[in-house]
Amino acid sequence: MTDEELIKRINSALAEEFELELDEMVPEAVFKDDLDLDSLDAVDMVIVLEQEFGIKIKKDEAFKAIRTLGDLHKFILSKKDEAA
């Protein structure tokens, strides 16, 4: 899977879970300000991403620093690279 395909998969999973429009899913979108997602949504996001990609996120300190969709893309891409 290419990085671009992975990013599309992330965006689709989140758009479906949180009822967001795909055109809102831009790298600079801030979860709280632009996508109206709060800390409780972050818990759901972890579950969705863990199930979608078969990775463990919960105990990863780097996840706490994610503020934008682009940050999330980089985080998931780095997980893919670690697994390779």
Image (cartoon, grey):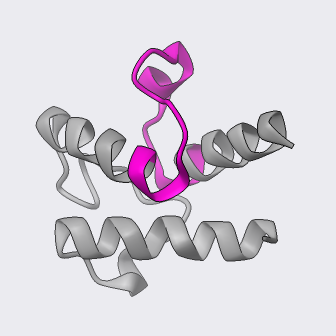
- The mark total stands at 0
Judging depth in this view, the residue of 54 and 3 nearest the camera is 54
Side (left or right) of 48 relative to 5: left
Position of the N terminus by quadrant: bottom right
Can you tell which quarter of the image residue 39 is in?
top left
Residue closest to the eye, 34 or 39: 39
**Quadrant (top left/top right/bottom left/bottom right) for the C terminus:** top right
- Is residue 52 toward the left or the right of residue 38 in the image? right
Residue drawn at 22 percent across, 66 percent down: 17
Image position of 71 with respect to 12: above or below: above
Does the image show residue 25? no
**x, y (%) of residue 46?**
35, 40
Residue placed most toward the observer, 31 or 41: 41
Residue depicted at 37% across the width and 77% down the height:
24
Spot occupied by residue 67 in the image (x, y as percentages of width and height): 43, 38
In the rendered structure, which segment of residues is drawn in magenta?
Answer: 50-71
Q: Could you tell me which residue is drawn at 80 percent across and 33 percent down?
A: 82
Compared to 49, does 82 lie above or below? above
51 falls in the magenta region: yes
| Residue at x 19%, y 66% (from the top left corner) | 18
Horizontal side, residue 45 vs residue 53: left or right:
left
Asked if the magenta segment contains residue 6, the reply would be no
Question: Taking the image as drawn, is residue 30 in sight?
Answer: yes
- Name, please, the residue furthest toward the right: 84
Residue 35, image x, y percentages: 26, 61
